[in-house]
Amino acid sequence: MLNDAMRVNRSRDHLDKLLAADQGFYSWSIRVEPAFARALDFLVSEGFANWGVANDRTTAKLTEAGTSAAKALSESPEVFVKEKEYLKVVAKGLTEQLVVSVLSASRVRV
């Protein structure tokens, strides 16, 4: 969801409305960007993350090197400025339950 919202203004609007409870779960078909999967594969191959399983789901977890790199990016005032500002706004409201609800509603859509 975040990847889609960070890339496409319309998707960002959907996420904002969902978090403000101004729109139903059914209204957003999340697009999965193929480059996102490649970026995850890159993170793993470069040692910044590891694949795992939690609650019968595939997970990606940052390694120590990944955490260090993420911290450096987070603390830099010059990179991902708009993205970091947006994430601060939506982070608290974006829960696993919300994601599951949106994905479940998307599956039953006709």
Image (cartoon, rainbow, N blue to C red):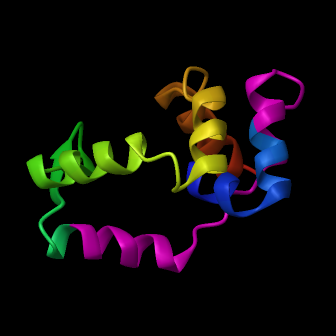
- Residue 39's quadrant in the figure? bottom left
Q: List x then y, in percent, for residue 99.
A: 56, 37
> Magenta includes 22?
yes
Residue positioned 25% across, 53% down in the render: 69
Q: Determine the main secondary structure of the stretch shown in magenta.
A: helix
Direction from residue 104 to residue 41 in the image, left or right: left
> Magenta includes 24?
yes
Q: Which residues are magenta?
A: 16-43
Of residues 45 and 99, the one drawn nearer to the viewer in this rendering: 45
Q: List x then y, in percent, for residue 8.
A: 76, 62
Q: List x then y, in percent, for residue 108.
A: 70, 49
- Residue 18's quadrant in the figure? top right
Direction from residue 5 to residue 70 in the image, left or right: left
Residue positioned 20% across, 53% down in the render: 66
Direction from residue 109 to residue 100 in the image, left or right: left
User: Residue farthest to the front?
Assistant: 77
Q: Indicate whether 38 appears above or below 108.
A: below
Of residues 35 and 59, the one drawn nearer to the viewer in this rendering: 35
The reply to whether residue 1 is in sight is no
